[in-house]
């Protein structure tokens, strides 16, 4: 089983070597440590996250943060509307005007600190949101 956290120990808990933990301790799983060691992580921007008012916009920020961060490797990203709605999570809308009405409020909140721009387009019978860092 793959897990972010392999083991936890809390203060005053007896450890496997017989000593007592003087503080809370965490052991991360190997896949997480490999990600850290290869550099595919970055510090989370808590200040920006805290400035976002809508919980769904915060969730969208969490999803986009690594891929759209202001680094030389920042990517322009296309998201399928249905998939993005599912992972935020939002109820998928059947009409483009309603989908835009819901998601644009979230995207507008991210413009400036995270997004330079965004645009919608139709593709293969669905909708795609083009996001520029």
Image: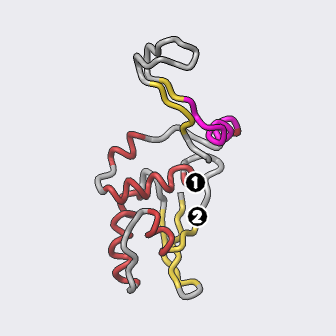
Spatial separation of the CA atoms under disc 2 and disc 1: 8 Å
Is 73 on the left-hand or right-hand side of 80?
Answer: right
> Is the magenta region chiefly helix, strand or loop?
helix
- Front-most of 23 and 63? 23
Asked if the magenta segment contains residue 35, the reply would be yes
- Front-most of 112 and 59? 59
- Front-most of 79 and 71? 79
Q: Residue 125 at what x, y percent from top left? A: 54, 88
Is the residue marked by circle 1 packed among few (<14), some (14-19), or many (20+) residues within 10 Å? some
Please tell me which residue is depicted at 36% across the width and 73% down the height of the picture: 91
User: In the figure, residue 56 lies in which quadrant?
Assistant: bottom left
- Marks 2 and 1: CB-CB under 8 Å? yes
Q: Residue 108 at what x, y percent from top left? A: 37, 63
Residue behind mark 2: 77
Indicate which disc residue 99 carries.
none
Is the residue marked by circle 2 packed among few (<14), some (14-19), or many (20+) residues within 10 Å? some
The segment highlighted magenta reads 27-37
Colouring scheme applied when the structure was drawn: secondary structure
The relative height of residue 122 versus residue 112 in the rendered view (above or below) is below
Say which element carries label 2.
strand
Please tell me which residue is depicted at 40% across the width and 76% down the height of the picture: 92
Residue behind mark 1: 67
């Amino acid at each position: 089983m793959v897990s972010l956290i392999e083991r936890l120990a809390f203060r005053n808990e007896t450890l496997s070597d017989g000593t007592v933990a003087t503080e809370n301790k965490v052991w991360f799983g190997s896949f997480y440590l490999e990600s850290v060691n290869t550099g595919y992580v970055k510090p989370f921007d808590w200040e920006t996250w805290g400035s976002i008012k809508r919980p769904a916009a915060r969730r969208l920020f969490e999803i986009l943060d690594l891929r759209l961060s202001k680094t030389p490797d920042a990517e322009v990203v296309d998201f399928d509307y249905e998939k993005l709605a599912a992972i935020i999570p939002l109820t998928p809308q059947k009409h483009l005007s309603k989908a835009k009405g819901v998601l644009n409020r979230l995207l507008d909140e991210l413009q400036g600190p995270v997004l330079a721009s965004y645009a919608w387009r139709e593709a293969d019978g669905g909708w795609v949101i083009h996001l520029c860092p």
